[in-house]
Amino acid sequence: MVVAGIKIVPLGTADPHVSEYVARCLDVLDKYPDLTYELTPNETVVQGQLDRILQAAKEMHLEPFRQGIQRVVTTIVIDDRRDEEMTMKGKIRAVEEKRQK
């Protein structure tokens, strides 16, 4: 299982708001029921098999072009751990357990 952060940034939009483009990228992710994702303020975190995440990321990257955008910058951060099972919730839980309250 891989946890990846995907950030799609359409450049040269007529409006500084990009939420409509982000929404369409999430629509793309909905076509991948085997992937789990969570929208955050700065990126979308996706959990699943690496090949499926990369396939979805490519389709997400292409989505703003389909909407007429001429330039898109996509950043992908992949966390791939092979020694034990990793999940989005597990990563958060590990940090929260170590916090001093």
Image (spheres, rainbow, N blue to C red):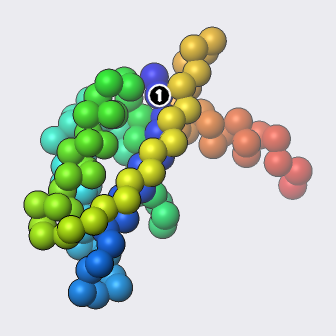
Residue 15 placement: quadrant: bottom left
Q: Secondary structure at mark 1?
A: strand
Query: In front: 55, or 32?
Result: 55
Image quadrant where residue 93 sits? top right
Question: What residue did someone put label 1 on?
Answer: 2
| Residue 87 screen position, x and y as percent | 52, 31
Q: Is disc 1 surrounded by few (<14), some (14 to 19) or many (20+) residues within 10 Å?
A: many
Residue 70 picture location, percent across and down: 21, 68
For the point 73% across and 45% down, which residue is it? 96
Count of marks overlaid on the render: 1
State the residue at coordinates (35%, 85%).
Answer: 16
Please give the name of the residue rendered at 27% of the width and 52% of the height, measured from the top-left corner: 61
Report whether 71 appears left or right of 74.
left
* Residue situated in front as seen by the camera: 5 or 90: 5
Left or right of 79 in this view: 47 = left
Which residue ends up furthest to the top in the rendered image?
83
Query: Can you see residue 72?
Result: yes
Q: Quadrant of the C terminus?
A: bottom right
Q: Residue furthest right?
A: 100
Q: Position of residue 82 (x, y in %)?
A: 57, 14
Q: Residue at x 40, y 41 (%)?
A: 46
Locate the N terminus and report the quarter of the image it occupies.
top left
